[in-house]
Amino acid sequence: MPATPTGVAAAPGRLPLFGHMHRMLTEPRGFFESLRGRGDIVTIGLGPTVAYVINEPSWVHQILTRDVHKFAKGIGYEKSAPFLGNGLLNSTEPTHMAHRRLMQPAFHTAQIAAYADQMRESAEQRATAWRDGQVVEFGQEIHAFTVAVVCRALFSADLGNSVAVQVEEALPVLLKGVTRRIAFPIGWLEKLPTPGNRRFNRARHRLDDILTNVIAQCRARGATDGNLMAILLSARAQGDGPGLSDQQIHDEAMALFLGGVETVRDVLSWACHLLSQHPDIQRRLADEVDAALAGRSLDHSTLANLGYLRQVLTETLRLYPPAWLLSRRTVTEVALGGHRIPPGSHVLFSVWTIQRDPAVYAAPSTFDPDRWGGAAAAALPRTYFLPFGAGNRNCIGEPFAWEEMMIFLATVTAHWTLHPSPGHRVRPSRSPMLQPKRVPLIVRAR
Ligand code: HEM
């Protein structure tokens, strides 16, 4: 293991062999936030391994942009590799940029607008099935919605619907396995036939089989209708070069599932929870939605008139960024300020901590969508807001996510007001994403 550079503070409470596993599993965000005051760069123990936590946002920006070629994706992706394979989320150059260019057309504005109708259909399917006064488990409802939306955009309406339920079951099991593997990254433990490892492997094989099957069906049909799978199937990497193999298509589809399902579900779940806690904000949002719809059906063009909804979602992304902890591994020595991080080192940064810095955000824990309106918003430093990452590894799905999130929340707001379920406290789960455990809310017809 390379020596730790001098002058780098070490986080207290590191246990031999276990490192900071106990804190990573029991209070992960509090743990990372507690490191902010200890220095711009601090070491922690991931099991017996050392990792560098970067607290200085300008260095995080440097890692994601100027120095991006000095880093590989880190431990979070390494531990997801058994099911993620080599898709956009964790592939290295030059494959990454070649595949990203191929997939980019599926995320262009015109194409995103074309997904709007099926997104609205999926949102209405859920929101119109609820009864006045019903307690709705929003985590589950939104998960079903986001799986359906990604499956339909990725494959086609009929194939998408047929795989959605199976994907919905498999993803949470895989993410739970990844959490354990990050907190205590000991390779041989992952191979033991424990119940957790067996569940992880079963879910991985199930998802593999689903994708293999559906790719074969798409190939057999011939892809024509502009969905993501059609783009992948007809892709030619370089001019007349070979297209993507079934394995490559499988891995890219997996990246879109992992990148696109749980993230949107988490933001929307938190947003619904926050709205239920803030009736005044909810009322203002309802007024905006009513005025924008004015009795018409929601479509892509409506979204341009929903500025306050955008602020509500931006503030939710600030408080609850699903990818709250990003990881990298140095492939060469990297200089950050006066420090030299050796090659092969784990590097982590907490988006949660950066986006709650009291030096930049007044009352950082308060849900205040107004901070994103007017001149005050323009003055906020961009390096302190990175829910979608930055640089050439930023989120390719960001425009898709905005479309989907706005359509879902506008649809729900048009029909219902949301109220907390008495006696229930919404808390984060142990997922590697920042996910609320359960979000039971009472819906009342408007
Ligand atoms: C609110 C929703 C979303 C959030 C907060 C989010 C967040 C992120 C972040 C932070 C990254 C960069 C990770 C890193 O640098 O390590 C990323 C990458 C990625 N996201 Fe998203 N994402 C969201 C929605 C989506 C959607 C809807 C899709 C696809 C349909 C998607 C697909 C991807 C892919 C494929 C990458 C890898 C891009 C690359 O490395 O070139 N994401 N996302």
Image (tube, helix red, strand yellow):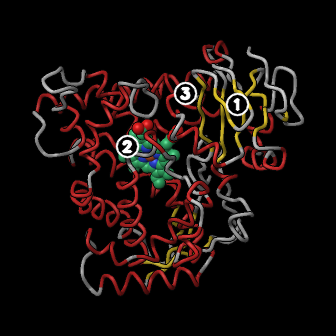
Q: Earlier in the sequence, mark 2 or mark 1?
A: 2
Query: Residue placed at 64% from the left, 71% from the top?
Result: 367
Q: Earlier in the sequence, mark 3 or mark 1?
A: 3
Q: Closer to the observer: label 3 or label 1? A: 3
**Label 3 CB less than 8 angstroms from ligand 1:** no
Task: Look at the image and tell me whether residue 75 can be seen.
Answer: yes
Horizontal placement of 237 versus 176: left or right?
Answer: left
SS at mark 1 in the image? helix
Query: Residue placed at 55% from the left, 28% from the top?
Result: 71
Horizontal placement of 50 versus 426: left or right?
Answer: right
Q: Earlier in the sequence, mark 3 or mark 2?
A: 3
Name the residue tied to disc 2: 165
Alpha carbon distance from label 3 to label 1? 24 Å
Q: Amino acid at mark 3?
A: Lys
Residue 297 x/y as whole percent: 25, 77
- Disc number for residue 93: none
Name the residue tied to disc 3: 70
Neighbours of disc 3 within 10 Å: few (<14), some (14-19), many (20+): some
Alpha carbon distance from label 3 to label 2? 40 Å
Neighbours of disc 2 within 10 Å: few (<14), some (14-19), many (20+): some
Name the residue tied to disc 1: 183
